[in-house]
Image (cartoon, helix red, strand yellow):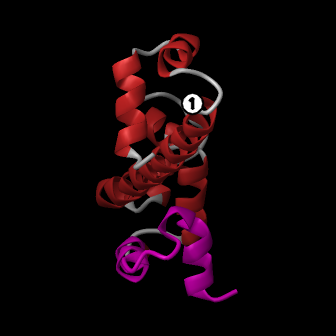
Amino acid sequence: MTDTEEWREALPHRAGDSSLGAVSARLATRTTPAVVRDVVDDLGRGLLAQLWGEPTGRDWLGECGGPLGAALVLAEVDAAASALRSHVAGARASLLADLVEDHSLVELAELIGVSRQALHKTLRNRGL
């Protein structure tokens, strides 16, 4: 497996993103793709626990390359979470658009626990 493939696997949220090369180059000065993948897969919990002084059984901070490396890796956790939020919001809006075909906005809003205006805004913001 090439270094580029390893970084692509470690940063799946950057698939198709032109910044993958620059991001992986910055991370590579401090840590490895395996460590980044572990932290992203763990949603940063182990690293955060260590930063908060809790026992973790693993030197996450050291493996990330110290405080600067940890900050870079946590930025990738944030980017992965942002990508996930975007995908989830899109899928939810698509499902809601399908449901509006069988339910009124008022009925559907009541069923999912939001206001009609909030539901309308969700659908409008997604171009639905």
> Looking at this view, is 110 or 63 the one in front?
110
> Looking at this view, is 99 or 57 the one in front?
99
x then y, percent, for residue 121: 34, 32
Q: Is residue 3 magenta?
A: yes
Residue shown at 55% from the left, 19% from the top: 108
Q: Quadrant of the N terminus?
A: bottom right
x then y, percent, for residue 46: 53, 39
93 to the left or right of 74: right
Predominant SS along the magenta part: helix
x then y, percent, for residue 116: 40, 18
**The quadrant where residue 8 appears:** bottom right
> Looking at this view, is 111 or 8 the one in front?
111
**The quadrant where residue 19 appears:** bottom left
71 to the left or right of 40: left
Q: Is residue 54 above or below residue 42?
A: above
Query: Which type of secondary structure does the marked residue at label 1 adopt?
Result: helix
Span colored in magenta: 1-27
Q: How many marks?
A: 1
- Residue 79 appears in the picture as rendered: yes
2 to the left or right of 43: right
41 to the left or right of 116: right
> Looking at this view, is 95 or 21 the one in front?
95
Residue at label 1?
100
Q: Is residue 81 above or below residue 109?
A: below
x then y, percent, for residue 28: 43, 76
Q: Is residue 37 above or below residue 116?
A: below
Crowdedness near tag 1: few (<14), some (14–19) or many (≥20) residues, C-alpha within 10 Å:
some
Residue shown at 62% from the left, 82% from the top: 5
Residue shown at 40% from the left, 35% from the top: 122
Q: Quadrant of the C terminus?
A: top left
Q: Residue furthest right?
A: 1
**Which amino acid is tagged 1?**
Val
